[in-house]
Image (spheres, rainbow, N blue to C red):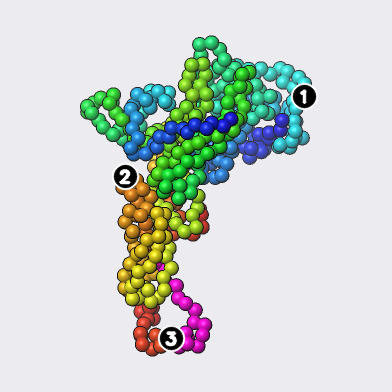
Amino acid sequence: MTKKREEIVEILDESFEISLAEICRNYTVQAETIIEMVEEGLIEPLIEAEEHSSVHWRFHGPSVHRIEIALRLQRDLNVNLAGASLAIELLEEIDRLKQRLRIYNEEKL
Amino acid sequence: MNYQDYYEVMGVKRDATQDEIKRAYRKLARKYHPDVSKEKDAEKHFKEVGEAYEVLKDPEKRTAYDQLGSQWQAGQDFNPPPGWDSGFEFSGGGYTDANAAHFSDFFEDLFGRGSSHGFSGAGQQQGFHMQGEDHQAKVMISLQDAYNGAERAITLQVPKVDASGHVITQSHTLNIKIPRGITRGQRIRLRGQGSPGMGQGKPGDLYLEIDFEAHPLYRVENRDIYLDLPITPWEAALGASVSIPTLGGTVEMKIPAGSQSGNKLRLKGRGLPGKVAGDQFVILQIETPKAKSEAEKKLYRQMEEEMKFNPRSRLGV
């Protein structure tokens, strides 16, 4: 099946914003799950309009990616949120180091 | 249909205990988890391991599977003998964690098509709605395309549910616009290009992660481009203006007098475009011409006489 029309592309970078409600809908998760991730320090909302209300929280692209990975790691590997957060931070550090290494190494890693 | 050797997939003996199987599964799941693993085909392995565990962790399914005998080789053409499963009841549940939609035909023929959500069939019932699954894929693009932006046709293998409720794989070609200035690791979302939804459920989305093809000249970090630039000893010593290739075309750059190998010069804003454009870094590499003719050798000897240069003074020798 070939589609000729051009697809609408969204870049999920820092300029991409999504609301808490949309995240809950897209990933079929409870708002509490996302709030726990914020409390864990895994992701940060862009604005906290009212100190105690998460209703207005918005997140940018990289946070959405972290949410997805955290959900998959918890589901597939039986780790808790703290464990998933630790794994994600280490994975991102490995990615940064590999990128640095590539600059100094001719060979592809 | 090909026979699947679940014991081989899990790396355990046929007489392994349930505990050994569980340990093997946990280990392999971590090793091949697509978010964690950098191995090629990690996703394929992860699904195979999930399928093998689905069978071996359940004593009833395992016993039935064992009944097929151990004479089969993985990949061998296989049809279940008639009545092989008499006395076993697999339908309706038992698919706890794994997503059975990814299981092989072999599994499906033996145990039927399960579902991770506790309903049977592929959701053809009236009134049942579920959003389709999201899909992830990696796309390799050239650095030049990232710099200029481009339109590319990409072909993906996408599972689809056919009229009879079976999941079939279809190749699906999408024309996508690669935005100018996209970088490695960035993700783009194509709405509604994942799996179809069930009932009135919306289709899932397709996520593409960008990676760059290796470039013969440039290396990339975020939006910055790195280039090794060979220069002559006299260009390094006396300074010079040289031509430098960049993604946007050739530019002139001044090399300051007294440059050394490894010095890094910056061409501001010549990296990948973006809100803040990246820079191009030029790393100098002094190349020494070979002294082939007598005249050339004489020049080097003359330098030795005149320059009194000991690059090893720091080493105390």
Q: Pointer 3: what residue? A: B299
Question: Range of the magenta residues?
Answer: B284-300
Q: Pointer 2: what residue? A: B275
Q: Is residue B262 above or below residue A25?
A: below
Q: CA distance from mark 1 to mark 3?
A: 86 Å
Residue B180 visible in this rendered orientation of the protein? yes
Q: Chain of mark 2?
A: B
Is residue B288 one of those drawn in magenta?
Answer: yes
Give the side of residue B49 with respect to residue B240, left or right.
Answer: right
- The answer to whether marks 1 and 3 sit on the same chain is yes
Residue A73 visible in this rendered orientation of the protein? no
Residue B26 in the image, given as x and y percentages of width and height: 54, 36
Is residue B274 one of those drawn in magenta?
Answer: no
Q: Nearer the viewer, mark 2 or mark 1?
A: 2
Q: Secondary structure at mark 1?
A: loop
Give the side of residue A61 with respect to residue B122, left or right.
Answer: left
Q: Say which label, 2 or 1, has the lower sequence index.
A: 1
User: Which residue is more in the foreground, B304 or B295?
Assistant: B295
Q: Secondary structure at mark 3?
A: helix
